[in-house]
Image (cartoon, grey):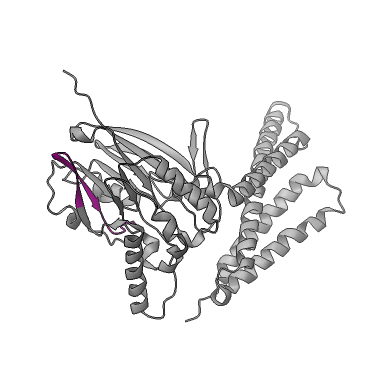
Amino acid sequence: MRRKIPFVPILIFALVFLSINGYALNVLAPIIAAPVLPWLWAFPISLLGVFSFSVVRLSVDGFNTMFKISAHTLLVYFVSLLVLILTALLTDIYRLATASINYLAKGNFSYAERPLNAIYLGMLLSLLIILAFIYGIFKGKYAYRVIKHTLHFDDLPHVFDGFKVVQISDVHAGSLKNPKAVQKGINLINRQQADLFVFTGDLVNNKAEEIKPYLNHFSQIKAPFGQFSVLGNHDYGDYTAWPNNAAKRENLEQLKKYHAQIGFRLLLDEHVEIKKDDQKITLAGVENWGLGFGERGDLEKALRGTTKDDFKILLSHDPTHWEAQVKKHASKIQLTLAGHTHGMQFGIEAFGLKWSPVQFRYKHWAGVKKENNRFLNVNRGFGFIGFSGRVGIWPEITVIELRKAKTTT
């Protein structure tokens, strides 16, 4: 079946985009010669036309080079316009407020010209955004960061005090195009000297074959207490067309075999015991469970055979599972490790600020959260999808050190 062409969404986006572009050109009018202004419409209109054509052709050509280049260029241009007009809008609000106060005080309404300094500031900020996106597309998506957390637990078995868990998530192998850069990420993982390594889902975008070029890379990851994994929403092949259901099922089975070939023990609604000396912790893993992304996982099945007093770590791809079922579960799960959000691959985490548009969708979208005396860590992802880059939200390797909380007497 041919995919329906989304004419209405394209039309709505085109109107919004051209309106924003018109406002931006109005802002720039004082510093650009009048005869030049009409020509500045040529680039955005041409870009919009190429992007719209490639969207219409998606069902035939797929995500080809023309679509990727036009989509990324449009995204960068659109965000830079938003920054420019936001700066101008704040200035316009100030001008209107000043004019209104002057009118109330003196009966004379005088609307001042937009300050040139404000225009130049908006242009500078827009340029910085463009440069940030260029860096994110060419370098930032492979700029792996190690983020370390030390978590304290009253009920951690004492022999696991100092036990180190390394987590990555969301590899999205179909998006990776730089094996050398990926190898640097693998080397960085191994340098953390994990006791236990875990991967929390989305090994591929759609098809199992995507991971084949990187099997030798990820099979280098080793930890003395093992390497474990779960599936994410993209691993089931739900976002691409299949000739029949049998082909889709075969793809999933092949992906499971690739997990084993890499050396990852895939946990499918089950648990294992990690034993050290005469003590243990329970490591459980569920199939993907996420609000809006398929609720396949069976937490009760995964915990079957455990007790409420066992120290448990849960691998669950989507953090909405923790909010919906885990944090108040009758059997305490001390630590849940998730991914999925990618931090939307765009945001700010600097100077005490932590912001990303993804926060409007997810209550907790990155890092560690503690509630009901239970911890959740959301990894920002190792790979990327959709936007072929990362701006401000860098690919993450998480290192979590488990510590026994000191008791006070």
Camera-side residue of 207 and 353 = 207
Camera-side residue of 224 and 42 = 224
Could one spot residue 101 in this view of the protein?
Answer: yes
Query: Left or right of 111: which side holds 288?
Result: left
**Number of callouts:** 0
Picture coordinates of residue 338 (x, y %)? 34, 48
Location of residue 380 with respect to 162 vertically, above or below: below
Picture coordinates of residue 127 (x, y %)? 69, 43
**Residue at x 34%, y 38% (from the top left corner):** 400
Could one spot residue 171 in this view of the protein?
Answer: no
**Residue at x 82%, y 53% (from the top left corner):** 37
Magenta stretch: includes residue 290: yes
Q: Which residue lies furthest to the top in this view?
A: 409
**Residue at x 40%, y 62% (from the top left corner):** 234
Location of residue 247 with respect to 124 vertically, above or below: below
Location of residue 351 with respect to 92 vertically, above or below: above
Picture coordinates of residue 231 (x, y %)? 33, 59
Location of residue 208 with respect to 194 vertically, above or below: below
Camera-side residue of 323 and 66 = 66
Picture coordinates of residue 408 (x, y %)? 19, 20
Looking at the rendering, in which quadrant would you find the C terminus? Answer: top left
Magenta stretch: includes residue 70: no
- State which region is magenta: 272-292
Camera-side residue of 347 and 86 = 347
